[in-house]
Amino acid sequence: MARTSVRCVALRLLVVCAAVVLLYGLGLFHREKRFTYSKDTYTNYNGGAPWRMHGILGIREDGTPGYQRASCPTNYNIAEELRSNGFFGRLSDCLPLDRNITDGRHRSCRYVQYDLDNLPDTSVVFVFYNEHLSVLLRSIHSVLNRTPPQLLKEIILVDDGSDKPWLGRQLENYIQLLPKVKLVRNSVRSGLVKARLRGIAESTAETFTVLDSHIEVEEGWCEPLMARIKGDRTRVLMPQIDSINQETLEPVVGGIGCSLGFLWNLIEHSIPIQKQDQALRTTEIDAVRSPTMAGGLFTANREYFWEIGGYDTEFGFWGTENLEFSFRIWQCGGSLECMPCSRIHHIFRKGGHAYSLPQGHVAKNKLRTAAIWMDDYAYIVQEAIGATDSSINVGPLDHMMELRDKLQCKNFDWFLKNVYPEGIITGMRDIRSLGTIKSKHHDLCIDNMQHTYANARMGTYSCHGHGSQTFLVLARTKEIRPIGNLELCLTSEVTISWCEARHDVTWDYDPIVMLLRNHQTQLCLTVGDANSLTTEHCDPTNPKQSWSFHDKYPEKHSAARS
């Protein structure tokens, strides 16, 4: 009987504990009151509600909807459907324009209190070119539905020279049924940077918010951005970016994290929150400092944006404007932060694109960014994108260099040491060599064999010194990375694999006996049969294990060898 009684008590305690956890999760034990919108927020709009902040949208005077949903496709090849847009456009056409997306925020976000009447307002800028109509309209509806009217002054649509018929009169007629929406058109395609600049110039609110034209916002997305920027106009703010499945169009929690760095071919790169940035936070919902931004979704003070020069107007159609702007923000006295309570779902295209880009524009943008902001480190970008002997015309730099002097911007060495100290390079001392790794056995160099994907096997080939034989050898981390993909490291298996996922990517080098010894296996890199690459027990007398670094930039990397 005693044992039965003890079991009953334990079972009851377990039930009580489970109930407490459930009620806590529902917020019933939370000290703070859950934030709710007063009815005054949305009652000026017909049919207004917390999930319809600007009332019922897109209704004609006769009560009929201005947009007719299509029938859902039942017979399709998903690869074909993705090819034209990078997402299932015909499925989008049959889905409602108003969707109540699941709240994926940390539960503490729901208890943050906002005085909406005392926050800055914002102009939302959508730039589009040949966007799928239903996806564009759903993006607009989402912002109108989930943004308090006090905070949303206007939505500015910038059509960058689209030639699709549904983006003509059909779009114009529909947006007349929506509040606060303004459409401006570029007669010819000018590119993302110039189109955004026009939208920002047309904006009239205290802040502007740039959003891609294939997004849906979550509840409470705008308030954290406006509250944070009110405290400091030099803050540029990002939401946390979730995703939308390209095939099902279902919102998915998870996408791009709050902290971004960059790869040396100048692509943004998700990273864990750095220790110094985490130390500034006291809760899970505090702002996260980020070295760079993804670029498609951010908020800035309008006057501050122009004070630091806006975008670089010499940029080509698309690409790298996010990193150029990120470097400028930090180096010229501002800051870049992500707000975890602001969440926006974004379609990351897969299997296709809605438009093409002129050749050479992305490389031009990368080379401009390196030349203007990266100082002595620009050569690494040139090597990483294969543009060391490039004839690409990057355009005039005078205006941007004068801006940098006027704003008294810091150098890139400062950025690496103070903003991105957990990057693979924080100073020239971190680089041992950038060039070829040559074997003493015949005229052979380590070669990626034209393979720059994960788990590709490395080999050796007659030395020619071009891209497939160019490796970045790091002094601090002791990693060997192929210049064609600096996310990958040489492993003990003589493959290149994701550096952060492996524990066998550090190599000790003895310059006396010229051995490259894997730190984990204690085996040495060896030229194998038929000029293959392998590892064997270390033997200082074996010429097939003797390696030398032929650095293209020895004067820059001398500190790492001293």
Image (tube, rainbow, N blue to C red):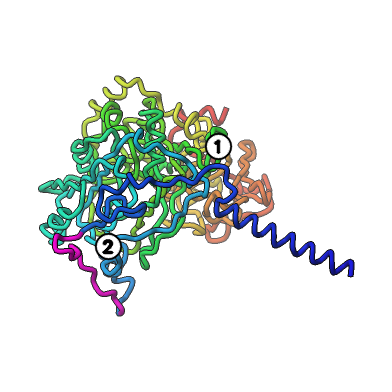
Q: Is residue 306 above or below residue 352?
A: above
Q: Residue at x 22, y 35 (%)?
A: 204
Q: Quadrant of residue 138?
A: bottom left
> Quick one: SS at disc 1?
helix
Residue furthest right in the image: 2
Decide which of tag 2 and tag 1 comes sooner along the chain.
2
* Lateral position of residue 381 relative to residue 548, left or right: left
Q: Residue at x 55, y 54 (%)?
A: 26
Q: Which residues are magenta?
A: 59-74
State how far apart marks 2 and 1 are (Cα).
Answer: 38 Å
Within 10 angstroms of label 1, few (less than 14), some, or many (20 or more) residues? some
**Mark carried by residue 527:** none
Main SS category, magenta section: loop
Q: Quadrant of residue 540?
A: top right
Residue 60: within the magenta? yes
Q: Which residue is mark 2?
A: 85
Q: Is residue 97 above or below residue 427?
A: below
Q: Nearer the viewer, mark 2 or mark 1?
A: 1
Q: Which residue is mark 1?
A: 278
Task: Say what amino acid the circle numbered 1 marks.
Answer: Gln
Q: Give the camera-side residue of 312 and 87.
A: 87
Q: Give the camera-side residue of 547 and 518.
A: 518
Q: Is residue 172 above or below residue 562?
A: below
Which image quarter holds the N terminus?
A: bottom right
Which image quarter holds the C terminus?
A: top right
* Lateral position of residue 257 relative to residue 210, left or right: right
Residue 232 is situated, as x and y percent measured from the top left of the image, at 39, 28
Task: Say what amino acid the circle numbered 2 marks.
Answer: Asn
* Lateral position of residue 551 relative to residue 493, left or right: left
> Quick one: SS at disc 2?
loop
Q: Quadrant of residue 400?
A: top left
